[in-house]
Structure formats: C-alpha cells, structure tokens
Amino acid sequence: MKKKLFLTGILISMMIFSAVAIYAGVDEAAARKQPAAANFMPEAFTEIQTAMAVSVSGVRKQDANYLKGLSAYIRHVNRNVSQQEADEMVKSFMKYADRYDVDEKIVMAVAQTESCYYADVVSCANYKGLMQTGDVLAEACGYDPERLFEPEISIHVGASYIRDKLDEFGDTRLALTAYNQGSGSVHSGNYSTGYADLTMERANDMERFLKEKGYI
C-alpha cells in the first residue's frame, strides 16, 4: 500500500512538472513570436505599399502610352497635323468623351469621317470644324459659332451631340446615323447606315492601330 502511494506521488509530481514545463515552453514561444510579428507587420506593409506604387505607376504609364497612341493615330491619318496639335486634340477628345460618357474612339472616328482632323473646314451646308457641327448646336452649348474652328470647342459640341443621340436612340449605329442625317430620318426609317458603319469601322481601325503599335 505504501509503495502504491509512493508511486502515485511520483506520477503526480511528474505530471505537475510537465504541465509547468509545457506552459513555460508555450509562454516562451509566444514571447519569441511577439517580436517577430512586430517586425513582420511593417515589412509586410512596406511590400504592399511597394506593390501598390508599382501598380499605380503601371496604370499611369499605360494611360500616357494610350494617349500617345491616340495622338500618333491622328498624325497617321493626317500628317499635316503637328505633334502639338494632335496632343491637344487628344486631351480634348478624352476630356469631353469622359464628360459625356462616350467612347473617345467613337468621338475621334466621327472627327476623322467628318473632317479628317482638319480644324478649319467648312461644308457647303456651313457646318464647321473638326466635328462639322452647325451654328445652332454651338449656340446651344454657349459658344459663338465662329469658335467651332477651335478644336476643343468643336469636340465639346460634337461629343455633347453624340451623347444626345445615344440617349435618344440607345444604339451607337442609329446615334451616328442621326448625327449625320438627323433624328427625323432615323425616326421615319428613311436612312442609310453607311456613314455610321464607316465611322464605327474607323474606330475599330484605331483600336487595331493602337494594338499593333504597342500602345495598348
């Protein structure tokens, strides 16, 4: 009986010692991990910041390259447009396409179809400038009609009108047809989509040009 009690006491002592040792080991491990975790967080945060910076830089670079490509396309179509003029046109195309939520390539394609990017042209019907819009539209946008010869003003008026036609018809082909032939022709069904098809194909040509030249 005494022997059994002695052995039981030894076992209990061993269990208590083991528990203390395990607790101490866990506590020590936690103590070792704490500094490591503290050191890891700023390092990890720095890596995230670096990745974000690279991403943002990449987006900016891609955007700049895209704008450069649009400018190159204008000069590809019309070599009489200077680099500076093309760059300024692109800024306006992007600005007003964004304002009126229209694809900038569509706005640019309209300018190509209407004027081949010549800013000073006048049609026999007295439509003026890059986008070949009339005096009434210029005045509706708050401009003197003579300012339609300014590329930015012409692009503003043209992009606004494209937006109106898109809202009216809900279809790019019909909107472009109305831009060229008037809403009445489209509503009456007395129209041709030749102008719209040509303009949309030019927008596609622009996309192909940007891809082939490595701009996108």
Image (spheres, helix red, strand yellow):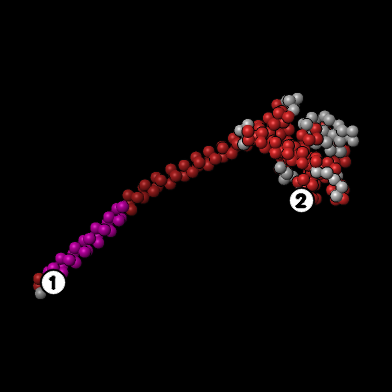
Residue indicated by mark 1? 5
Counting labels gives 2
Foreground of the two, 117 or 154: 117
Lower sequence index among marks 2 and 1:
1
Foreground of the two, 190 or 36: 190
Give the magenta-colored segment's residue range. 4-29
Residue 170 x, y percent position in the rendering: 76, 50
Quadrant for the N terminus, please.
bottom left
Q: Secondary structure at mark 1?
A: helix
Q: Residue at x 49, y 43 (%)?
A: 48
Residue 156 x, y percent position in the rendering: 78, 39
Residue 187 x, y percent position in the rendering: 85, 50
Q: Main secondary structure of the magenta part?
A: helix
Residue indicated by mark 2? 170
Q: Residue at x 36, y 50 (%)?
A: 34
Tell me if I can see residue 84 in this picture.
Answer: no
Foreground of the two, 20 or 102: 102
Q: Residue at x 15, y 68 (%)?
A: 9
Quadrant for the C terminus, please.
top right
Whether the magenta-drawn stretch holds residue 14 is answered as yes
